Image (cartoon, helix red, strand yellow):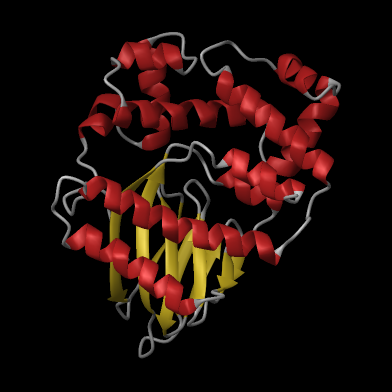
Amino acid sequence: MLPQNHVAISHFLAEVKVELIISLLSKCKPNWTQGPFKPAYSKIYFITEGEGRMMINGQTLAPKPGQLVFAPAGLTQFYSVTDPDNTYSMYWCHFTSNLSFIPLFSLFQLPYCLDASSPDRIVSAFEKLVNAYQQERGPARSIRIQAALLDVAADFIEQAVQAVPGVHPPRSEHKLSSVIQYIDDHLAQDLTVAQLSEVVHHHPNYFIRFFKNHLGMTPMAFVYERRLEKAKQLLVASELTIGEIAHATGFHDIFHFSKAFKHKIGVAPSEFRSWPRATPEFPTKVQD
Protein backbone atom coordinates (compact mmCIF):
# COMPACT_ATOMS: atom_id res chain seq x y z
CA MET A 1 0.00 0.00 0.00
CA LEU A 2 1.36 3.45 -0.95
CA PRO A 3 2.17 5.89 1.87
CA GLN A 4 -0.52 8.53 2.38
CA ASN A 5 1.73 11.37 1.23
CA HIS A 6 2.41 9.49 -2.02
CA VAL A 7 -1.30 9.14 -2.64
CA ALA A 8 -1.93 12.82 -1.90
CA ILE A 9 0.88 13.98 -4.19
CA SER A 10 -0.28 11.65 -6.96
CA HIS A 11 -3.77 13.09 -6.65
CA PHE A 12 -2.42 16.65 -6.67
CA LEU A 13 -0.45 16.00 -9.88
CA ALA A 14 -3.08 13.92 -11.66
CA GLU A 15 -4.16 16.74 -14.00
CA VAL A 16 -0.82 18.52 -14.43
CA LYS A 17 0.06 19.83 -17.87
CA VAL A 18 3.22 21.71 -18.77
CA GLU A 19 4.28 24.10 -21.53
CA LEU A 20 8.00 24.44 -22.26
CA ILE A 21 9.41 27.92 -22.78
CA ILE A 22 13.06 27.00 -23.31
CA SER A 23 15.56 24.25 -22.44
CA LEU A 24 19.31 24.31 -23.01
CA LEU A 25 22.70 23.11 -21.84
CA SER A 26 24.75 26.24 -21.25
CA LYS A 27 27.46 27.92 -19.19
CA CYS A 28 26.55 31.01 -17.19
CA LYS A 29 28.28 34.26 -18.03
CA PRO A 30 30.64 35.84 -15.46
CA ASN A 31 28.04 38.53 -14.73
CA TRP A 32 25.13 36.06 -14.32
CA THR A 33 22.79 37.65 -11.81
CA GLN A 34 19.08 38.27 -11.55
CA GLY A 35 16.61 39.26 -8.88
CA PRO A 36 15.02 39.43 -6.55
CA PHE A 37 11.98 38.77 -8.75
CA LYS A 38 8.92 36.52 -9.01
CA PRO A 39 8.86 34.80 -12.40
CA ALA A 40 5.57 33.58 -13.84
CA TYR A 41 7.30 30.40 -14.98
CA SER A 42 8.95 27.51 -13.12
CA LYS A 43 12.57 26.43 -13.53
CA ILE A 44 14.51 23.20 -13.15
CA TYR A 45 18.30 23.14 -13.20
CA PHE A 46 20.81 20.30 -13.16
CA ILE A 47 24.28 21.56 -12.28
CA THR A 48 27.15 19.85 -14.11
CA GLU A 49 30.07 22.18 -13.24
CA GLY A 50 30.94 25.36 -11.36
CA GLU A 51 29.54 27.22 -8.41
CA GLY A 52 27.08 29.99 -7.67
CA ARG A 53 24.37 31.17 -5.33
CA MET A 54 20.60 30.98 -5.54
CA MET A 55 17.82 32.10 -3.23
CA ILE A 56 14.31 30.65 -3.49
CA ASN A 57 11.50 31.73 -1.18
CA GLY A 58 13.99 33.08 1.35
CA GLN A 59 16.19 29.97 1.36
CA THR A 60 19.80 30.53 0.34
CA LEU A 61 21.22 27.71 -1.77
CA ALA A 62 24.64 26.93 -3.21
CA PRO A 63 23.88 24.08 -5.64
CA LYS A 64 26.87 21.89 -6.50
CA PRO A 65 27.59 19.73 -9.54
CA GLY A 66 25.30 16.70 -9.50
CA GLN A 67 22.44 18.55 -7.81
CA LEU A 68 18.97 19.43 -9.08
CA VAL A 69 17.12 22.67 -8.34
CA PHE A 70 13.39 23.28 -8.77
CA ALA A 71 12.17 26.88 -8.50
CA PRO A 72 8.34 27.06 -8.66
CA ALA A 73 6.69 29.96 -10.45
CA GLY A 74 5.52 32.75 -8.20
CA LEU A 75 8.21 32.49 -5.52
CA THR A 76 10.74 35.25 -4.91
CA GLN A 77 14.07 34.23 -6.44
CA PHE A 78 17.60 35.51 -6.78
CA TYR A 79 20.64 34.16 -8.67
CA SER A 80 24.26 35.27 -8.75
CA VAL A 81 27.82 34.23 -9.56
CA THR A 82 30.23 33.53 -6.69
CA ASP A 83 33.34 32.97 -8.82
CA PRO A 84 33.46 34.64 -12.27
CA ASP A 85 36.12 32.14 -13.37
CA ASN A 86 34.09 29.09 -12.35
CA THR A 87 30.46 29.77 -13.26
CA TYR A 88 27.77 27.15 -13.55
CA SER A 89 27.47 24.82 -16.50
CA MET A 90 24.02 23.30 -16.36
CA TYR A 91 21.05 21.81 -18.08
CA TRP A 92 18.03 24.01 -17.48
CA CYS A 93 14.47 24.65 -18.53
CA HIS A 94 11.79 27.25 -18.01
CA PHE A 95 8.15 26.20 -18.25
CA THR A 96 4.60 27.11 -17.33
CA SER A 97 1.96 24.74 -16.02
CA ASN A 98 -1.77 24.59 -15.44
CA LEU A 99 -1.29 24.33 -11.68
CA SER A 100 0.92 26.07 -9.17
CA PHE A 101 3.69 23.95 -7.66
CA ILE A 102 3.89 26.20 -4.58
CA PRO A 103 1.26 24.23 -2.59
CA LEU A 104 3.06 20.98 -3.38
CA PHE A 105 6.35 22.27 -1.97
CA SER A 106 4.65 23.98 0.99
CA LEU A 107 2.35 21.16 1.99
CA PHE A 108 4.96 18.40 1.83
CA GLN A 109 7.96 20.62 2.65
CA LEU A 110 9.87 19.44 -0.40
CA PRO A 111 13.42 20.75 -0.81
CA TYR A 112 14.21 23.14 -3.64
CA CYS A 113 17.66 21.58 -4.09
CA LEU A 114 18.74 17.94 -3.82
CA ASP A 115 21.39 15.46 -4.92
CA ALA A 116 20.44 13.59 -8.08
CA SER A 117 20.24 9.91 -7.17
CA SER A 118 21.03 8.95 -10.75
CA PRO A 119 22.91 11.76 -12.53
CA ASP A 120 23.18 9.75 -15.76
CA ARG A 121 19.40 9.41 -15.91
CA ILE A 122 18.92 13.14 -15.30
CA VAL A 123 21.39 13.98 -18.07
CA SER A 124 19.61 11.57 -20.41
CA ALA A 125 16.20 13.09 -19.58
CA PHE A 126 17.48 16.63 -20.12
CA GLU A 127 19.20 15.66 -23.37
CA LYS A 128 15.86 14.39 -24.69
CA LEU A 129 14.21 17.63 -23.63
CA VAL A 130 16.89 19.86 -25.17
CA ASN A 131 16.91 17.84 -28.39
CA ALA A 132 13.13 17.95 -28.66
CA TYR A 133 13.18 21.72 -28.09
CA GLN A 134 15.97 22.43 -30.58
CA GLN A 135 15.62 19.79 -33.26
CA GLU A 136 12.24 18.08 -33.22
CA ARG A 137 10.01 19.34 -36.01
CA GLY A 138 7.58 16.47 -36.57
CA PRO A 139 3.81 16.57 -36.06
CA ALA A 140 4.20 15.07 -32.57
CA ARG A 141 6.76 17.69 -31.46
CA SER A 142 4.58 19.13 -28.72
CA ILE A 143 3.91 15.67 -27.29
CA ARG A 144 7.60 14.76 -27.27
CA ILE A 145 8.48 18.02 -25.55
CA GLN A 146 5.79 17.62 -22.90
CA ALA A 147 6.76 13.99 -22.28
CA ALA A 148 10.43 14.89 -21.86
CA LEU A 149 9.64 17.83 -19.60
CA LEU A 150 7.32 15.76 -17.41
CA ASP A 151 10.04 13.14 -17.13
CA VAL A 152 12.48 15.73 -15.79
CA ALA A 153 9.90 17.14 -13.35
CA ALA A 154 8.84 13.67 -12.20
CA ASP A 155 12.44 12.71 -11.43
CA PHE A 156 12.83 15.75 -9.20
CA ILE A 157 9.52 15.29 -7.39
CA GLU A 158 10.04 11.59 -6.72
CA GLN A 159 13.50 12.20 -5.31
CA ALA A 160 12.27 15.16 -3.25
CA VAL A 161 9.49 13.07 -1.70
CA GLN A 162 11.98 10.35 -0.79
CA ALA A 163 14.18 12.97 0.86
CA VAL A 164 11.46 14.05 3.31
CA PRO A 165 9.17 11.07 4.01
CA GLY A 166 6.18 11.66 6.27
CA VAL A 167 6.76 15.34 7.01
CA HIS A 168 3.11 16.03 7.82
CA PRO A 169 0.71 13.69 9.56
CA PRO A 170 -1.33 11.80 6.97
CA ARG A 171 -4.53 13.36 8.30
CA SER A 172 -3.32 16.88 7.52
CA GLU A 173 -2.28 15.83 4.03
CA HIS A 174 -5.65 14.20 3.40
CA LYS A 175 -7.58 17.25 4.61
CA LEU A 176 -5.65 19.70 2.50
CA SER A 177 -5.83 17.43 -0.52
CA SER A 178 -9.61 17.26 -0.06
CA VAL A 179 -9.91 21.04 0.11
CA ILE A 180 -7.73 21.55 -2.97
CA GLN A 181 -9.80 19.04 -4.92
CA TYR A 182 -13.03 20.73 -3.80
CA ILE A 183 -11.69 24.11 -4.91
CA ASP A 184 -10.68 22.73 -8.32
CA ASP A 185 -14.10 21.13 -8.79
CA HIS A 186 -15.99 24.34 -7.92
CA LEU A 187 -13.90 27.14 -9.43
CA ALA A 188 -16.84 28.43 -11.46
CA GLN A 189 -18.86 28.96 -8.28
CA ASP A 190 -18.63 31.58 -5.55
CA LEU A 191 -16.50 30.08 -2.77
CA THR A 192 -16.29 31.22 0.84
CA VAL A 193 -14.09 30.35 3.80
CA ALA A 194 -17.13 28.97 5.62
CA GLN A 195 -17.92 26.69 2.69
CA LEU A 196 -14.33 25.42 2.43
CA SER A 197 -14.00 24.89 6.17
CA GLU A 198 -17.05 22.63 6.07
CA VAL A 199 -15.21 20.27 3.70
CA VAL A 200 -12.81 19.33 6.51
CA HIS A 201 -15.20 20.07 9.43
CA HIS A 202 -13.20 22.92 10.92
CA HIS A 203 -14.32 26.21 12.39
CA PRO A 204 -13.64 28.95 9.80
CA ASN A 205 -11.16 30.80 12.03
CA TYR A 206 -9.20 27.65 12.77
CA PHE A 207 -9.38 26.60 9.13
CA ILE A 208 -7.77 29.88 7.97
CA ARG A 209 -4.84 29.34 10.38
CA PHE A 210 -4.58 25.66 9.44
CA PHE A 211 -4.57 26.45 5.72
CA LYS A 212 -2.09 29.32 5.97
CA ASN A 213 0.31 27.35 8.18
CA HIS A 214 0.52 24.60 5.54
CA LEU A 215 0.31 26.51 2.27
CA GLY A 216 1.64 29.92 3.21
CA MET A 217 -1.45 31.82 2.06
CA THR A 218 -5.08 32.27 3.04
CA PRO A 219 -7.77 30.01 1.54
CA MET A 220 -9.20 32.80 -0.61
CA ALA A 221 -5.76 33.83 -1.87
CA PHE A 222 -5.25 30.21 -2.90
CA VAL A 223 -8.62 30.17 -4.68
CA TYR A 224 -7.59 33.30 -6.58
CA GLU A 225 -4.29 31.69 -7.63
CA ARG A 226 -6.06 28.50 -8.67
CA ARG A 227 -8.55 30.42 -10.81
CA LEU A 228 -5.78 32.16 -12.70
CA GLU A 229 -3.89 28.88 -13.19
CA LYS A 230 -7.04 27.30 -14.62
CA ALA A 231 -7.57 30.33 -16.85
CA LYS A 232 -4.05 29.94 -18.27
CA GLN A 233 -4.78 26.29 -19.02
CA LEU A 234 -8.06 27.10 -20.79
CA LEU A 235 -6.49 29.92 -22.79
CA VAL A 236 -3.87 27.53 -24.15
CA ALA A 237 -5.84 24.31 -24.52
CA SER A 238 -9.43 25.30 -25.31
CA GLU A 239 -11.45 27.24 -27.90
CA LEU A 240 -13.56 28.97 -25.24
CA THR A 241 -14.00 32.71 -25.57
CA ILE A 242 -12.42 35.04 -23.01
CA GLY A 243 -15.88 35.60 -21.53
CA GLU A 244 -16.54 31.88 -21.24
CA ILE A 245 -13.17 31.36 -19.55
CA ALA A 246 -13.93 34.18 -17.11
CA HIS A 247 -17.20 32.47 -16.20
CA ALA A 248 -15.60 29.00 -15.97
CA THR A 249 -13.00 30.25 -13.51
CA GLY A 250 -15.32 32.15 -11.19
CA PHE A 251 -14.79 35.73 -12.33
CA HIS A 252 -17.95 37.81 -12.52
CA ASP A 253 -17.20 39.60 -15.77
CA ILE A 254 -14.61 39.92 -18.52
CA PHE A 255 -13.29 43.25 -17.21
CA HIS A 256 -12.62 41.86 -13.72
CA PHE A 257 -11.02 38.74 -15.19
CA SER A 258 -8.80 40.66 -17.65
CA LYS A 259 -7.66 43.09 -14.97
CA ALA A 260 -6.82 40.28 -12.52
CA PHE A 261 -5.07 38.23 -15.19
CA LYS A 262 -2.92 41.12 -16.43
CA HIS A 263 -2.01 42.13 -12.88
CA LYS A 264 -0.82 38.60 -12.08
CA ILE A 265 0.61 37.37 -15.40
CA GLY A 266 1.73 40.68 -16.88
CA VAL A 267 -0.23 40.48 -20.14
CA ALA A 268 -3.90 40.47 -21.10
CA PRO A 269 -5.62 37.08 -21.61
CA SER A 270 -5.87 37.60 -25.38
CA GLU A 271 -2.14 38.34 -25.63
CA PHE A 272 -1.27 35.32 -23.49
CA ARG A 273 -3.38 33.12 -25.77
CA SER A 274 -1.56 34.42 -28.86
CA TRP A 275 1.90 33.51 -27.58
CA PRO A 276 3.54 30.65 -29.48
CA ARG A 277 4.42 27.64 -27.35
CA ALA A 278 7.69 25.78 -26.97
CA THR A 279 9.48 27.82 -29.62
CA PRO A 280 12.58 30.02 -29.45
CA GLU A 281 10.42 33.04 -30.22
CA PHE A 282 8.36 32.68 -27.02
CA PRO A 283 8.27 36.24 -25.64
CA THR A 284 9.75 35.66 -22.21
CA LYS A 285 12.85 37.42 -20.90
CA VAL A 286 15.18 34.49 -20.48
CA GLN A 287 18.39 35.46 -18.72
CA ASP A 288 19.93 32.10 -17.96
Task: Name the quadrant containing residue 185.
Answer: top right
Q: Is residue 179 above or below residue 40?
A: above
Q: Is residue 146 above or below residue 262?
A: below
In the rendering, at what x and y percent does residue 98 appear? 43, 37
- Asked whether 225 or 16 is in front, the reply is 16
Left or right of residue 117: residue 229: left
In the rendering, at what x and y percent does residue 261 appear? 39, 27
Residue at 59% in and 71% down? 114
Residue at 48% in and 63% down? 78
Left or right of residue 192: residue 170: right
- Asked whether 102 or 31 is in front, the reply is 102
Residue at 42% in and 85% down? 50
In the rendering, at what x and y percent does residue 108 appear? 70, 51
In the rendering, at what x and y percent does residue 200 appear? 80, 25
- Asked whether 123 or 101 is in front, the reply is 123
Q: Is residue 182 above or below residue 70?
A: above
Left or right of residue 229: residue 6: right
Residue at 69% in and 28% down? 179
Q: Residue furthest bottom?
A: 85
- Residue 278 in view in this figure: no
